Amino acid sequence: MEDLKRIGLLFMVMESHYRRHPLQALFLFIGLVTGVTLWVAIQFINEHARASYLEADQFLGAQATHWIKSKDDTGIILKDYIKLRRNGYRQIYPVLEVRLTSADQQPVNLIATDLLALPPIDRGEYRDTNNWQSLTQFPFQAWYPASLAKRLNISTGKQLSLSSGISLPPALIQTRKQQGERIFMDIGAAMTVLNRTSVSYLAVAGLSDEDAISLSRLLPSNLKLMTNEQVLDLSELTQSLHTHLNAMSLLSFAVGFFIVFNAVHFSLRIRTQTLTILQEIGVSVRSITLAIAVETLLLSLLGTGFGLILGYALGQALLPVVASTLQNLYGAVLDHHLILQPIVIFKAWSLTLLGLVLALAWPLWSRTRQTILKQRELIVEKSEDRKILKRFTLIAFGLAILAMLMYPSLSTVTQWFVMLALMLFSAAFILPVLLALSLSALQALLPEKSWRLRWALSDGWAQLPGIRIALMALLLTLTANVGVDTLVGSFRIALTDYLQQRMSADVYVQTKNLNLQKLLQSPGLENHHLRYLVTFRWKKRKTLIRGMNTQAPDMLVLPIAESDPEGLESWYGNTDGVILANEQAQHLSGIKLGDHVEFDTPTGLHSFKVVGFYYDYGNSTYEFYLPFDRVKQYWPKAELQPHIAVWLKEEVDPESILLDAGAQPGDWLYSNDILQVSLSIFNRTFAITAAMNVLTLAVAGIALFASLLAIHQQRLPEYAHWRSMGLKQREWLGLIVLPLGVCVLITWGLSIPLGSLMSILMIEDLNVISFGWTMPIEWRWEPAAHLLIITTGIVILTLVISLTQVRFRLPQALKQLGGDNG
Amino acid sequence: MIRLLFFLLSMSMVHLIFAGDTYDVLRSKGEGFSLVVPNKKLVFPRDHLTHPKYRIEWWYLTANLTDKTGREWGAHWTLFRQAINSKGQAEGWVSNQLWMAHAALSTPDGFIYNERFARGGIGQAGVDLNAKGSQFSAWLDDWLWLGNESAPLPGELVFNVKDYRVRLSMKVNTPWVLNGIKGYSAKSDQGQASYYYSQPHISITGEVKHGDQSLNVSGQGWMDHEWSSQPLADSQSGWDWFSLHLENGSAVMLYRLRNDNGKHFYSGTWIEQDGRSIALKGSDIRLKILENKPVDIGNNKSKSLPIIWSVQVNKSNERYQWRIEANDSEHWLNTVYPYWEGPIIAHGDISGIGYMEITGR
């Protein structure tokens, strides 16, 4: 009991520091909360996404363990659906899932079902669905998640116009479970509005093996029953993306704790005095250690609590962006409401505690372990900078060596991120050394008479200990920004080139209404490409084999990443036994040029020699190209894809020729429109990286702001001294800004090669093992220049705020300097 | 027979399912829908089929059955149709018709039931004749009532309740009974009415399958077909309905529409063994509750319901009296539209068996 009282008293003495220095307390708290917030936000999203994948065997709140799809992808007619229901398969329900394009060329996904046909669910569900009549009767209703409505600029009652000229029903901002970033409509309404005659597929809820066999027997020959393996697929496919997000959030966490460390660093000098006095009056090291532990624990709880609240809000705000990415890349559907998972709370607290132990408890505790004499020396000795810089150099080299040692044996995405982190932190630790060396060098270069400049640079030495941690944080985020921007920019260029090359046809037409013979005989037709498609699982992943006309115009310009020229020629010559694979199959399944891949075909086990790999951006599945006739040879029941690529003669009006061949308006898409929509999807997919970049930069900005404010507060007596000596405000400003500007410029300058190196590693290696895509690096100045502008903006903003603060307090400081306490 | 008509009208299927309790529909006037008027001649087989311009309609079967060991079984199966508005089209994906079906089975061990829903217009549920016009069918998914010819009777009904599969073959020897005045059945003194006809003399043989077990059952059934657009009177809150197969081969149907002001509306039909029927006026019927019992209505709640009744009917110059009691009081259907429906036994001047339905607040 006495012990507890003593610790309590001791704790109060120690915490009095924060009461006397509220600004330091504030920055410590800001660092703590900002670090935790972004990390927590991403954790919430990741956990939420994983929980959603586990629900991938559900559909709009109902189970969907199997799908019934048409073999030729043309959908399922009503008669076939009703026949199954009337045979007692009440767990079957119809789904219409379409990707639409708005009038302003934005991609929009729509999902529709018959709520009454969903398997028996909790009756509460029925009651939630509060307006069956509005949903199913003209003018119908379209339900938008709020984020999607915002993106499309749709409000309640407004109708979305599509590029086809159709308008969707009046909007209602409302969602169902597992709706994701999609518009929901009643299937009857959707079929009517979109003028459809067949549903996309049938979902099946819960089917025993026995039922699956009897159901398969009942299906017409054009339909097939498939197991929904999305739970497995999504968990595997999305792993890389979540690791990427994790890495970004950890970076932000680290930057946040740099702020904490910075605040502790500023307080350490004063708190060391308190610790020394406490030890001098006989308080044991054990008691002080316990008080530090209590402080750390309380701060960790406080930081976690606020971080969780803000992180949840931020996660909720970021969720639509991540949901969009996951939907575009993997077809994963995320709900719009985050669930507070206990595991995230526990992880957040553990990580915060660990961060605080390193940034707060350890420096404080190490002071208590020193002898009182040593502590006194430290107080007297104003700078042990050289020692610190030496330590930083050692750490930097240590980390760099570790990174280099790891590099040759990297095999997983996580290992890659660890290596990148080592590299980044190595650079961050060497930054203060570089800054010190640069200031020295600049000083040495300046002539004797430029005393003002020399003074300004020497003032840099006074600023450096205070801002170096913030600059280290800034370097981390600038480097990450340059790296990620270069990666995304390179991918964008690669994807655009790729699409332009692949989408070389004039128009792509659905074949369901088409009189193919009539179209093929049309004199206006220059060329066409009709393909086979076979889907199966290979190496535990969904795999496609496409039967291509090797002489079609788009095949002649196939973007090849790597090939054996002779083999490629034989593929173009329809030779048996050779195959092309996409890059995903190359990099993710590990096949190499010249390897043989074996497929279990209906005609037996067949082996094909891989003679080339082609680029296939945006695809998450393994894919292979065989010559058209070879597919029919090995898969006699292979179905033609329901689309045909058409090249027309220049003078021909595409519309008239297609209408003449039986196509209906809406059955075709121009390649340019596909390109625009694809790029729009790309932009939405990578919006999350942009959001994360901005957020980490914001955290770094806070770090810089906190440092500057602390430095100026600490140096206030010094500034008062200068002013009393007659230094004008403009001169004083120059003294302060110049060294800071130099330091920030060096930090930015260093971030460019570092960021570029990071982008090279990400594009050449990390990206390949994550997604299986390779691309040329397209380095551009724009992101770096953009970051310089943003950084300058942050510096100016923080300077204005902190200098205003100084100006406000300077008269008081001058008074104190003059001994006027009144 | 009023049965679920007012209940459904009062709660309007769509509105109850999709928007909770909407008793207000009870007071609506059925504007835009076809109205029930006297002196309309019912024509068969046309009137065995749907009347989509009327707001609500149902086909209803109750059956008192016994197996070979003498154990008592009960079955009821209902198909409800509702037009959710008066203007939409009946056919196609955007049909304004909505279907609901209930199936319940009273086994010697207890009571089980199921409910189903389907949108209209796409063939998932309906009542129709085959392409040749020679065979009646009523269905929702795989629950199917198939007439041997263009009428529902004689015919066969197949449905399942939980893991019980029921197949009933139904035969009749008497004509359809038009309730009220030639099928115009009044429901209040203020003009509310329905078209309502019945077949009380259905001879049933059938089979109940449960797992590997198969039981033959036989007994008597009662079928109703009724349609209307008109709501309850403002003050009518629910009803009690009885059907009885009497030992002498006669049958009787009685109902009272409960009025908040205590002036309940009574009506009924007496049907002779040969199918001739006599409409019973309100003054011919006297119903008295003898005992209320708490009935489990799910969610750990119970409700006190009149399970034992004293019933008196004056037919011509004859007076009949019964003590009517539910075989088992636990027959609450906690469906989206909850109500009580189950087999009853009548002790009295001429004993009998039948079904009782209790709905409303």
Image (spheres, rainbow, N blue to C red):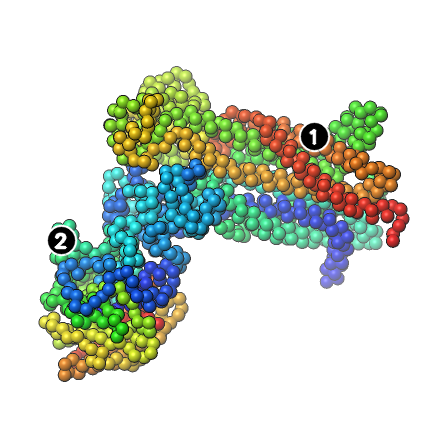
Q: In which quarter of the image is the N terminus of chain B?
A: bottom left
* Residue A650 visible at all: yes
Residue type, label 2: Gly
Q: Of the numbered discs in the image, which one, if any, rests on residue A746?
A: 1
Q: Mark 1 lies on which chain?
A: A
The 10 Å Cα crowd at callout 2, few under 14, some 14 to 19, many 20 or more, is few
In the displayed image of the protein, which residue is found farthest to the right? Answer: A819
Q: Residue B213: x percent and y percent?
A: 23, 59
Q: Of the numbered discs in the image, which one, if any, rests on residue B133?
A: 2
Nearer-the-camera pick, B29 or B12 = B29
- Residue at image location 37% in from the left, 35% down from the top: A537
Q: In which quarter of the image is residue A810?
A: top right
| Residues tagged 2 and 1 counted as in contact (Cβ below 8 A) | no
Q: In which quarter of the image is residue B222?
A: bottom left
- Residue at image location 26% in from the left, 33% down from the top: A662
Q: Quadrant of the C terminus of chain B?
A: bottom left
Q: Is residue A576 left or right of residue A246?
A: left
- Residue at image location 61% in from the left, 53% down from the top: A305
Nearer-the-camera pick, B301 or B117 = B117
Q: Is residue A353 above or below residue A650?
A: below
Q: In this view, does B345 lie to the left or right of A31?
A: left
In this rendering, which labeled residue sits more in front, label 2 or label 1? 2
Q: Residue A632: x percent and y percent?
A: 28, 27
Q: Residue A403: x percent and y percent?
A: 62, 31
Q: Which chain carries label 2?
A: B
Q: Of the numbered discs in the image, which one, if any, rests on residue A21?
A: none
Residue type, label 1: Ile
Q: In this view, does A746 lie above or below B41?
A: above
Nearer-the-camera pick, A386 or A521 = A521
The 10 Å Cα crowd at callout 1, few under 14, some 14 to 19, many 20 or more, is some
- Residue at image location 26% in from the left, 45% down from the top: A78
* Residue A214 visible at all: no
